[in-house]
Amino acid sequence: MYVLGIETSCDETSVAIVDDKRTIVVNHVLSQLKEHEAFGGVVPEIAARAHMDHLDTLIRAAMSDSGLGFKDLDGVAATCGPGLIGGVMVGMMAGKAIAVAHDLPFIAVNHLEGHALTPRLTDDLAFPYLLLLISGGHTQILVAEDIGKYKRLGTTLDDAAGECFDKSAKLMGLPYPGGPQLEKMAEKCADPEKAAARFPLPLPMKGRKNCDFSFSGLKTAVRNHVEKLPEGPLQPEDIADLACAFQITMGEILVDRCEQAIEGFLQQYKPKTPTLVISGGVSANMAIRKALQALTSHHGMDLYAPPLELCSDNAAMIAWAGLERLQKGLTDDFDFKARPRWPLDRSIDLGTAPRQGARTNK
Ligand code: KG4
Ligand code: ZN
């Protein structure tokens, strides 16, 4: 069984084909870095236009590199939300057009489910697992119970983790995209302990008996530190120290929030192989992986982090989510509407304190 996947929800145009033996036949990802660099962030209209300009070529390349014809496909999956609506519509309409023209089933994929199911594509991981979704637009802790069945334990009350990386990097004068740049600078820090003492940063929500996140205080603290440094461009040693202190703090925040979820998850689900999965762009960060590895080892759990090329947005995860849905007979009508917001599930409480004033981030 072969499924074609299309991803256009943010600033990556991507087309992939996967099969039911978990083979990624092709996965072409075209990043729009150059288009958005001058603006210091993703401009929705520019992103939508760039998807329109490149998607056809990418689909042709994926088909020709796979050695398959449209008649060999069993379905077409496209991200239909959440994301920047103009871009989502470009990919969704292309997917529907291919499905109509070749009489194939169409599968409307939730981008977050793509991230959530990545460990099943790469490692055949069994349900249920605990999932920390950390990307540019989302920060959530969920239990993945089955295809289309997710329980949300917590979400961010303000910024997403990736957004906090990007905004903090910008404050340090680092170019877009900030997350990976900040990680590179942090690696240059000579003495992480000294850096953390030099730039103390807050741990928002620390110890709270729920799984929600908040990052705006962390970003503000970075701004305050930057403003206290001598005027003009920051010195590389100062950036390295501040970036390192930031990463240590981000790791501590994620560990503290996941810790709140682990006990309830283990008690309620009693999984055979207890696993914490991290997914989304920020899961590429090595310092974050290390911090969470220590946490999972402490609790006798496995940590799963995707291979680097599948951490950030890609169509292989969309094709795979589509394939898993298709196998269950979960296909969609051609009048399916693109959704700028599309939560994976409502929130639940695993015996932790009630969440107050929480709102979903998409
Ligand atoms: O999942 P993703 O590609 O797109 C969304 O769905 O949002 O995540 C992009 C986010 C950006 O905020 C980017 O700065 C962050 O992931 N990111 C990183 C790293 N690589 C990407 N953050 C920290 N360290 C990294 N190495
Ligand atoms: Zn994503």
Image (cartoon, grey):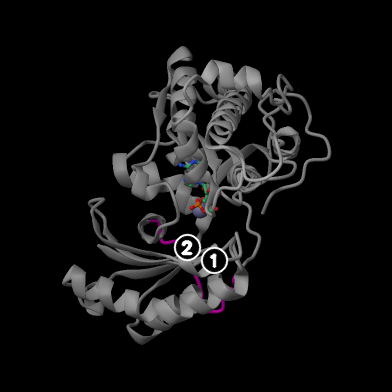
Measuring from the top left, give residue 187's x and y in whole percent: 44, 31
Identify the image quadrant of residue 194: top right
**Residue at x-position 70% and y-position 39%:** 219
Residue type at mark 1: give it: His
Residue type at mark 2: give it: Leu
- For the C terminus, the image quarter is bottom right
- Callout 2–callout 1 Cβ contact below 8 Å: yes
User: For numbered disc 2, what is the local secondary structure?
Assistant: helix
Q: Which mark, residue 33?
A: 2
Residue 66 left/right relative to 130: left
Decide: is 292 above or below 309. Answer: above
Q: Which residues are magenta?
A: 328-338
Decide: is 152 above or below 257. Answer: below
* Magenta segment includes 332: yes
Whole-Å distance between the Cαs marked 2 and 1?
6 Å
Decide: is 196 above or below 311. Answer: above
Measuring from the top left, give residue 129's x and y in whole percent: 47, 33
**Residue at x-position 31% and y-position 40%:** 124
Residue 317 left/right relative to 173: left
Principal secondary structure, stretch drawn in magenta: loop
Q: Which residue is mark 1?
A: 36
